[in-house]
Amino acid sequence: MLMGPADKQELELLELGYNPSAAYDVVDAITRREVDLAQQLAAEPKWQKRLDDIVDARALYWDLREDWDQAVSDVWPRIVTIDEFGLDRLRRILRGIPIVDIESTIRRANFSTGSHKWKKNDIHDSDFAGSAVTYCDVVWTEKHLQAQLHGHGLDRKYGTTVLSRPGELAAYLKQQSSV
């Protein structure tokens, strides 16, 4: 199931409208977007001071746009500016949505170094981490992502053990089986 359809199933699914390239196109577009922002931040280092605001604005626009617009229009009968709404309130809302909080924190960490080279796998990692850290007790991932999750306290915040080595996972599972 995690690997996708078998070759013989794919032909049937293609006839029904299955389009695996659409998902690849989305990841490619997100990767290009992140590379573009990294280049803009490198060209204008003064924007690093506003990195939190930039990442939050992008999360609001790219991740929550339709839901946000509907939620706000349900509460206010007119358009409400960010100044009226309040940046602190907006930040609390964004940090209060676990998947958005986790993915945005990972993005901020990658952008903050100024040296991170964005790859498609970074998009998969942040998407995976957003869901896994939110819903799983233990997450096994590579060292870079583990360092980000641990370094920014996301493992503690969401009560998730984050491991990066097979031996750590084996020891964790052995300990859990003896409890």
Image: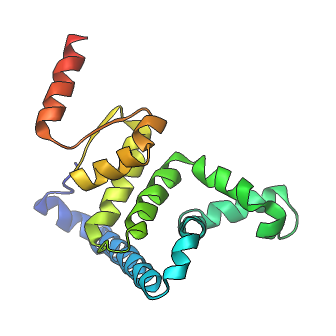
Q: Residue at x 59, y 62 (%)?
A: 64
Q: Position of residue 71 (x, y in %)?
A: 73, 57
Q: How many marks?
A: 0
Horizontally, is 27 left or right of 157 in the view?
Answer: left
Query: Which residue sits furthest right?
Result: 77
Horizontally, is 102 left or right of 18 in the view?
Answer: right
User: Residue 14's quadrant in the figure?
Assistant: bottom left
Q: Position of residue 142 (x, y in %)?
A: 21, 51
* Colour scheme: rainbow
Query: Which residue sits furthest bottom?
Result: 43
Camera-nearest residue between 89 and 75: 89
Q: Residue at x 26, y 64 (%)?
A: 13
Horizontally, is 104 left or right of 2 in the view?
Answer: right
User: Residue 94's quadrant in the figure?
Assistant: bottom right
Q: Position of residue 91 (x, y in %)?
A: 65, 56
Q: Residue at x 30, y 53 (%)?
A: 145
Camera-nearest residue between 7 and 134: 134
- Quarter of the C terminus within the rendering: top left
Query: Which residue sits furthest top?
Result: 179
Camera-nearest residue between 161 and 133: 161
**Residue 148 appearing in the image:** yes
**Residue 54 appearing in the image:** no
Q: Position of residue 161 (x, y in %)?
A: 33, 34
User: Residue 175's quadrant in the figure?
Assistant: top left
Q: Residue at x 31, y 67 (%)?
A: 16
Eyeballing the image, is 154 above or below 177? Answer: below
